[in-house]
Amino acid sequence: MNPLDLISPLDGRYAEAIAPLRDYFSEFAFLRDRVRVELDYLAALSKTGLIRPLSESEIHLLQSTSQNFSLNDAEAIRDFERETRHDVKAIEYFLREKLQATTLNDLLPWLHFGLTSEDVNNMAQAISLKDSRDAILRPALEDVLNHILEFVKSYRALPMLARTHGQPAVPTTLGKEFAAYLARLKKSSDEIVNHRFEAKLTGAVGNFNALHAALPQMDWFAFSADFVRSYNFEPNFVTTQILPYDNWIRYFDALRLANSILIDLAQDIWRYISDDYLKQAVVEGEVGSSTMPQKVNPIDFENAEGNLGIANALFVHFTQKLSISRLQRDLSDSTVRRTFGVALGHTLLAWTNLVRGMKRISANEEKIKSDLTIHWEVISEGAQTILRAAGRSDAYETLKQQTRGRVLTEADYRAWLEELDVNDATRAKLQVLDPEQYVGLAVQICDQVIQQTSEAQSIH
C-alpha cells in the first residue's frame, strides 16, 4: 500500500523514523520469533536424552530455518491460520510441512511437545522487548541524554532568572535547570537498561501437567529454567496459562517515567523559547506558518510532547490491563500485547524529535541577562538570610515590606542598604549580593551531574 493510504501515522507519515522497530514488532517479526522458539525448543529437547541427538547438519537446518525465515514463510503460516484461526497451531503445522521431507521427519511429534501457545508467545514477545531495547531504544535514549549533557556543559554557569509559581524567583543557571532533567532521566535510563525480563515455560495452566504426565522422570523445573535463561531471561515458575506480566509492566513503567520527565523538559523548553530565553536555528527553506513569514515554531518539542503523551497513554493501559486476567487466562491480553510496538514507536519518534530540537536551540544570553538584572527583588531571600544570621529577628519582615509585589531596581536596593543599621561585616555581605552572582552552588551541582553522567556513559 502507498504510505499515504495507511491509517496509522507510524506506518505512514512517520514510517522512516520508526522503521528500525519493524524488525521487532511487526507481524512478520512475531511469526519469525515464534518459529525460533519452537525450533530452539526442539533442539533443547534433543540435548536432554528424551529424543535422539541431532546431527550437525540437522542443527544447522534448524538454525537456517529460523534465521532465513522469509515473507513466503510468513504467508504460508497465514494460510494455515485462515483454516485453524489459531496462530500458534498454524506455526506448528507450517514447521511440520517444512521439516517432513528432511531427516528430522521422525521428530515431528516433538514439535510443540507439551507446550501451550503462551509458552511460545511470551518467549517471543520477551525477545522483541529485550532486543528492541538493546538495539534501538537504548542508543536513542543515550542520544537524548548526550544532547542534554552537552547543553548543561555549555550553560552550566549562565545566570538566569528562575520562576516559581510563574513569578520571578531566586536566580539559577540555565545549565542547572537542564541538569535537573539530566539527573532524573539518567536514573530512569538505568532502570530501563538494567531491567531483566521474565518469561515462562510452564504449560497450559502453569503446572507442567502434560510434560509431567508424559515424562514424570524428567526435571521439568530445571529444563524450563535452562531454556528460559538461554535467552537471558529470568524464569517465572508461578504462573497460570499466561506469564504474570508484572515484570513487563515494571519495564513499561520505567519507560513511562522517562517519557513523563521528557514531557516536562519539552514543556519547559517551549516556555523558554516563548520567553525568548532560547533561540532556534533558522533553517533555509523551512516554513513556520502558512501566513506569518516570521515564525520559527518549536515543532520538534511539540511533536515530542504529543507522541510522548500517546505512548504513555498506552503504557498506562498496559499496566491496567496486563495486571488482570480472568481465572487462568482470557484472550483480552493478547490483542493488547500486539500494540507494544505502537507505544514504543511513539516513544522512539518522540525521542528522535527531542534530539532534533536540542540540536537547534541555543541560549539568548542577552535576553536572559537583561531579565535578571531588572529584578533585584530576587536577592531578598539572600539579604534576609544574612540579616537572620546577624541576629535580626525582623529580617524577613524588613525585606517583605521593601519587595513584596514590587520590582526592585539596583538603585532601590542600594538605597535600602544605605539606610540599614547593621555592622560592617553584615553590610559587606549585603553589598556583594547581585542577581548575576547569587546562584548558590548551581555550577557545582552542574559539575557533579556532568561528571556522574559522563562516567556512566563512558562505562556503557
Image (tube, rainbow, N blue to C red):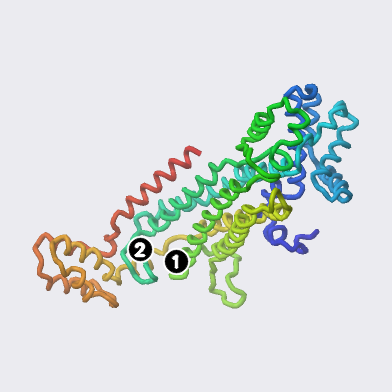
> Does residue 273 lie above or below 42 as drawn?
below
Three-letter residue code for mark 1: Tyr
What residue sits right under mark 1 in the picture? 272
Does the rendering let one see residue 344? no
Q: Which residue is mark 2?
A: 160
Q: Which mark is residue 151?
A: none
Residue 148's x, y, as percent? 47, 53
**Rendered view: 65 above or below 145:** above
Work out whether residue 279 or residue 443 is closer to the camera in this orientation and state it.
443
Identify the element where label 1 is drawn: helix
Q: Along the horizontal axis of the image, is 171 left or right of 196?
A: left
**What is the quadrant of the N terminus in the image?**
bottom right
Q: Secondary structure at mark 2?
A: strand
Within 10 Å of disc 2 (Cα), the crowding (few <14, some 14-19, many 20+) is many
Residue 420 locus on image (x, y percent):
12, 71
165 horizontally vs 82: left or right? left
Image quarter of residue 11: bottom right
**Could you tell me residue 63's position as x and y percent?**
76, 31
**Left or right placement of residue 153 versus residue 45 in this view:** left
x 67%, y 59%: residue: 14
In the image, residue 359 sits, relative to residue 276, either above or below, namely: above
* Nearer to me, 246 or 204: 204
